[in-house]
Image (cartoon, rainbow, N blue to C red):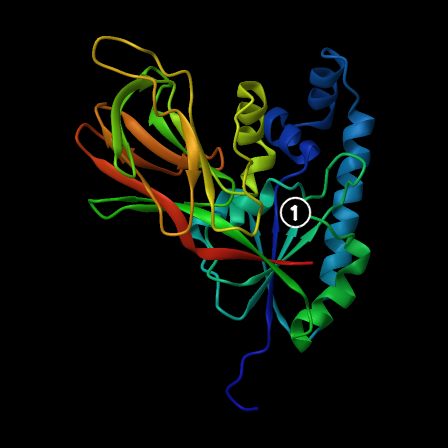
Amino acid sequence: MPGVLTPRVVVVTRPSDYESLLARHATRGQARFFLETRGGSIEEVEERHRALQAARDRVAAAIPVDWRRAAVGRADLDRFLFGPEDLVVVLGQDGLVPNVAKYLQGQAVIGLNPEPERNAGVLVRHSPEEIDDLLADCAAGRAQLEERAMVEARLEAGGRLVALNEVFLGHRTHQSARYRIEVGQRGERQSSSGLIVATGTGATGWASSIHRERATAFELPGPRACELAWFVREAWPSVSTGTDLTAGLLGPGASLRLVSEMEEGVVFGDGIEADCLSLPWGQPVEVRCAPEVLRLVQ
């Protein structure tokens, strides 16, 4: 049909360890020396690089010649403009999916695992050899999509941040975070190591560790549920701060509100500290389920 764009496949990758070593040490010899002094092997790193490159080539060869294509590295995601018709192929570790999810608006995501012996494959669950069938299924509209809930933090001043795993609220330099927390009708001034608000996807990571160590009574949410788990880290009791509000669940429509009492407070998502919201003294922020979801090809 005239005027209808062909699909564009956007391949998202990150540098291999070998590429990162060359960028840092300039030559293979220097990279080899660096690894050997630390008990490593340049041959192992090169083998993994070749496997990743073979997967990249496999994906490139699978894209039909009449389709559009683009490639973007993790470091450039915040400057890349995704289109509504894009098919997003994430090639790499599970953590690369949250890196890209925050920049999407419902585009289908195909996760490819080039190193199943090293990566769990929770979010990158397909082999690169499956890419032909996956692209064909997406183009024909017969791909099965799993929608995973995301979390948003919104400043009253207008800034907004979205994450797939969790958001962290605390001090920029990880000093004591001071704030007032409000959940439902309850509120409390606190001094802590900050707090996290996690989705069901993030419940398998950082939140899971806190949940397990505290033996928290409630169950963590599932990845598809619009429900969030929140945990205050190491709340400190004093004459002016309490420790009564340290964990809980936020159901659909519920939110957690925090008012900063820090000069250098921040909010960041999925461990990416460089992409953050500033949370200066007196700034309120509200955290809840995001309207966006990750649409992951099963």
Q: Say if 64 sits above or below 251 in the image.
A: below
Total label count?
1
The reply to whether residue 66 is visible in this rendering is: no
Q: Residue at x 46, y 55 (%)?
A: 80
Relative side of 115 to 107, left or right: right
Residue farthest to the left?
Answer: 282
Which of the pair 101/177 is nearer the observer?
A: 177
Relative side of 197 to 7, left or right: left
Which of the pair 141/215 is nearer the observer?
A: 215
Label 1 Cα neighbours within 10 Å, binned few <14 / some 14-19 / many ≥20: many
Image location of residue 17, percent across then percent down: 68, 32
Image location of residue 208, percent across then percent down: 58, 30
Image location of residue 9, percent across then percent down: 61, 64
Residue topped by disc 1: 123
Residue farthest to the top?
Answer: 239
**Could you tell me which secondary element the residue under label 1 belongs to?**
loop
Image location of residue 72, percent across then percent down: 56, 52
Picture quadrant of residue 62: bottom right
Where does the N terminus fall, quadrant-wise? bottom right
Q: Which residue is drawn at 54% across and 29% down?
A: 206
- Amino acid tagged 1: Leu
